[in-house]
Image: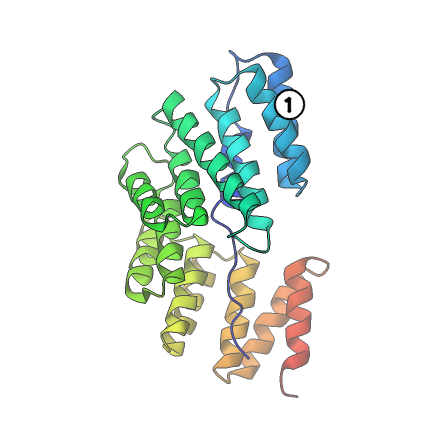
Amino acid sequence: MTMKTVTRTLTVPALLLALAGPGFAQSPASAELRFSTGVMHLREGRTDLALEEFKKAVQEDPKNPYFQKGLGLAYAAKASARSSGADAASAGEWKDAVACFRKALEINPYYVDVRNDLGAALVGSGDREAGKKEFLAAFSDAMNPSPEISAYNLGRAYLEEKNLAQAMSWFRSALNRNKAYGAAHMMLAETLLTAGRLDEAVAQLETGVRDAPNDLELLLELGRAYAKAGRFAEARSRFEEAAKADATGPVGRAAAEQLKTLPK
């Protein structure tokens, strides 16, 4: 049994909230409505519909950086969903995403969150060094409201490159900024496991569960780590806890399946 690899993307899930809150007093009401509809479609996985709404919002007000970001996220989501990142369609979508994020920054250089999106799009397009530079620029910017996300993104990039030392360093930097950041706990544990340091991975997940007690994915990962370490009673306890807390949700269902794999 192995711990489940965490596969949260660098773009849509972590950053959609940044789209939901801003006011658009200087944009036409119809453009605001299209934008809000696009956000809803993107949240619910209807990427093509989101793309069309964001395009129309941008057509009505091309100088709104939030509209540009939304359009970029839709392009990035389409590119990410393709089975091959090397085909012409995904390459074009990554290029379009990069252009949208750069336009958003051109309109508002203080919109630091967009650097995370730009970095992710550059990494997705294959320009990994440029992407990491954007993540680093975002992390170093005093105006960044969520530097832990930038550090996490750098950690993910380095982990994908099998640079485990740098990955660990950046995941720890993310946790230094926000100790309750569950994704960083999970990815640091994943990196430790990849390095063959199972006991440290378990300890990291234990810390994560203490620091983010409401993160059920962390609880599930801790159960998997206990199972891998042969600590089956502790694994069972964690799986049962997760299954009870999320009885009909994806974490609860996964925990119930994991319970079936444990020795009687």
According to the image, what is the colour scheme of the structure? rainbow
Q: Give left or right: position of 183 versus 169.
A: right
Residue 156 occupies quadrant = bottom left
Which residue is outermost to the bottom?
A: 264
Which residue: 64% across, 33% down? 50
Is residue 68 at all visible to an observer of this figure? yes
Q: Quadrant of the N terminus?
A: bottom right
Residue flagged by tag 1: what amino acid is it? Arg
| 216 relative to 71, above or below | below
Quadrant of image for the C terminus? bottom right
Q: Which residue extends farthest front?
A: 88
Q: Position of residue 219 (x, y in %)?
A: 54, 65
Q: Which residue is mark 1?
A: 34
Q: How many marks?
A: 1
User: Position of 143 compared to 13: left or right?
Assistant: left
Residue at 30%, 44% (x, y): give it: 133
> Vertically, is 67 above or below 9?
above
Between 14 and 242, which is closer to the camera in this rendering? Answer: 14
- The reply to whether residue 108 is in sight is no
Q: Secondary structure at mark 1?
A: helix
Residue drawn at x 38%, y 53% as measured from the top left: 179
Query: Residue 72: where, in percent of width, then height?
Result: 51, 34
Q: Nearer the viewer, residue 91 or 203?
A: 91
Q: Residue at x 44, y 46 (%)?
A: 125
Q: Nearer the viewer, residue 115 or 252?
A: 115
Q: Nearer the viewer, residue 13 or 119?
A: 119
Give the x, y percent position of residue 225. 49, 74
Image x and y of residue 60, in percent: 58, 15
Residue 138 in the image: above or below residue 183: above
Q: Quadrant of residue 33?
A: top right
